[in-house]
Amino acid sequence: MTESEKNKCHAIIHSHAAAVAGGNLVPVPGLGIAADIVGMTTMCLALATVFGTDNLPAEVAKGIAVGALKKTLLKQPVKTIGKELAKLIPLGGQITSAAISVSLVEAAGWVMAKDLEARAK
């Protein structure tokens, strides 16, 4: 990955992680995962353009996003469970859930970026 590609990926991943955090502030367990998948699908489409894959179908992007999220969640199951259980604690739990979601989406975003880079070669 070139330095330019890395900088573009960095901006895309951080902005999408911040947007996903907003969806995770809602105190409904399970809704955060849906927000993560939607955010990661749009992130995948944006990352694909960095590597010259402008015509990536939305269903393929969703599949890549779900795959990257699964890899990340399986490596960090305690964070995933804690994220959803934290929503049961008023206010503080919602903030904790959003913060955990940001870290998970960031990690999954880099997994996705490396996968898209490999597909582009």
Image (spheres, rainbow, N blue to C red):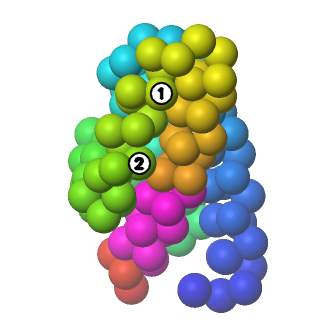
Asked if residue 55 is positioned above or below residue 91 in the image, the reply reads below
Q: Position of residue 71 (x, y in %)?
A: 28, 61
Going 34% across and 50% down the picture, which residue do you hit? 78
Checking the image for residue 62, the label placed there is none
Going 48% across and 20% down the picture, which residue do you hit? 87
Q: Residues within 10 Å of mark 1 (few under 14, many from 20)?
A: many
Query: Residue 59 magenta-drawn?
Result: no
Q: Position of residue 84 (x, y in %)?
A: 39, 29
What is the quadrant of residue 41 in the picture? top left
Checking the image for residue 79, the label placed there is 2
**Does residue 90 appear left or right of residue 73 in this picture?**
right
Between residue 113 and residue 91, name the one nearer to us.
91
The dominant secondary structure in magenta is helix
Residue at mark 2 to residue at mark 1: CA–CA distance: 10 Å
Disc 2 to disc 1: CB gap under 8 Å: no
Magenta span of residues: 106-117
Between residue 60 and residue 67, name the one nearer to us.
67
Mark 2: which amino acid?
Lys
Q: Position of residue 59 (x, y in %)?
A: 27, 40
**For mark 1, what is the residue?**
86
- Quadrant the N terminus occupies: bottom right
Dot placed on the residue nearer the N-terminal end, 2 or 1: 2
**Does residue 57 appear left or right of residue 13 in this picture?**
left
Query: Residue 109 magenta-drawn?
Result: yes
Mark 1: which amino acid?
Ala
- Quadrant the C terminus occupies: bottom left
**Does residue 107 appear left or right of residue 11 in this picture?**
left
Count of numbered badges drawn on the protein: 2
Q: Secondary structure at mark 1?
A: helix
Going 46% across and 43% down the picture, which residue do you hit? 40
**Does residue 104 appear left or right of residue 118 in this picture?**
right
